[in-house]
Image: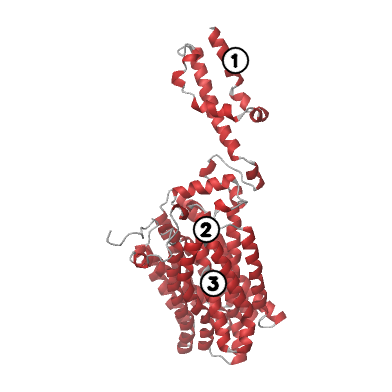
Amino acid sequence: MNSTLSLNRPVRNYTLGSFKNPKLIEARPSRHQLRSHLIDFSKLKWFGNVNSRTGSSVQQQLRDYSCESRRITSRRIRVSSNDAQFGSFPNKGGAESSSFTEFITSERVKVVAMLALSLALCNADRVVMSVAIVPLSLAHGWSRSFSGIVQSSFLWGYLISPIAGGTLVDYYGGKAVMACGVALWSLATFLTPWAAENSLLALLFARAMLGVAEGVALPCMNNMIARWFPSTERARAVAMAMAGFQLGNAIGLTLSPILMSQGGIFGPFVIFGLCGFLWVLVWLSATSSTPDRSPQISKYELDYIMNKRQKSHAVESKPKTKMIPPFRRLLSKMPTWSLIVANAMHSWGFFVILSWMPIYFNSVHHVDLRQAAWFSAVPWCMMALTGYSAGLWSDTLIRNGTSITLTRKIMQSIGFVGPAVALVGLTAAKTPSTASAWLSLAVGLKAFSHCGFLVNLQEIAPHYSGVLHGLSNTAGTFAAIIGTVGAGFFVELVGSFQGFLLLTSLLYFLAALFYIKFSTGERVNFDESADS
């Protein structure tokens, strides 16, 4: 009895009620809490008669205390001063899940925000010529077909760099390569006015250099997201980055006519070039190539990323990628070709719409340049919004148990079949407003592709996502050149944009069927030959 009474005293001091007092929690050393995890309740001989009611009560209270102390210890470990500083608010899942508040205030979102800004500049620099080509054509007497050649000069350079750039990204990481790319394409944009004033050849060379530099942008984006985001957040992260990509179109199309009216034809080239140099300075000083190298990241966020990444076979789980990737093995797998076909069709539709829609609205619906740019910009704003919604839906499907393969096929089907149907409606539009509505629907649904093939690159080849992106981008650039130049010749021969839009719609349907047939969300082994 005395032994029982003596035991009851410390047990009462550690009842659950006492743990509800935060002051008592802070005062009690964590070593006492952790020791309770080591108690073997089947060997409590020092409690006396463990078969008695008192002994059973003691066991039950200690079990309750052990469970509660585990929760408290976990909470105290997770809620550190660093977490509070960066707004990381953990939830019941600990490192297994991430709250919305933690997500939007995290270091990884800062990284993807900087990526979104770089992609916005990438497209703004690219799309300026789509607006400037109208006054330049009038000033120099260029035909429609030659205007298409001038616009496609960007793609000549873009054709060269994706594979080499993707290989460099896999070897050196996305941070360094992205900084070099943005600096080079900003320089090319800034020098475009000087080139245009000297010769047509210099103008074509400046636009080609812009394409060379911008060829590394998307592989760098994919590399950084694969390093910073777990698989359950990658669709959302890609959607956020690509939202900046699409907003760059809207910014370029809407601001360019205004800047031209204030500073001449070449005003936007100078402004956007200077913005790129400023971005490079911020990028180099404020971001890190990987989470474990970031001095600003909280302990909770780092643990969350590393734990999730270990489960999904992250990029860093393997020694550094070889400088010369296994091109033959990459091209021997049908999932690779599903990505190549998807990227080719995505680029065809993207560049045709981006390059020709201002001229389409100007020539078909007879609106002036500023209105044509505005009508062409609205769809890209729609694409930015629907892209993020698609990312949230995609991540939710995977968290709820839908396979990655099925999720990617659903997203890609919407991203291709939707625009195919909408382009048919665009050909029948009678007013600029109706045409803009159909075009907005086509471009908005096209954003679902970012949660299809674009995320799929990281999933089937985490160690070769850069070079695989480069391969598919090269195919996409070939398709974009054919589409951009072909549209000009097609319109000259047939005399109508509608026939080319119907051809594009048919190609969308065929590409969707190919992707559904051959794509996968599972990791593909590219380190062994196709026969093994």
CA distance for labels 1 and 2: 55 Å
Residue matched to label 1: 9
Sequence-earlier tag: 3 or 1: 1
CA distance for labels 3 and 1: 72 Å
CA distance for labels 3 and 2: 18 Å
Task: Classify 258 as above or below 247.
Answer: below
Q: Residues within 10 Å of mark 1 (few under 14, many from 20)?
A: few
Residue found at the far right of this picture:
262
Residue matched to label 2: 225
The quarter of the displayed image where residue 276 is located: bottom right
Residue matched to label 3: 214
Q: Nearer the viewer, residue 102 or 196?
A: 196
Q: Is residue 370 visible?
A: yes
Residue found at the far top of this picture:
1
Q: Amino acid at mark 2?
A: Ile
The quarter of the displayed image where residue 126 is located: bottom right
Does 78 sit left or right of 529 as displayed? right
Does 315 sit left or right of 190 as displayed? left
Residue 532 pos. (x, y %): 28, 58
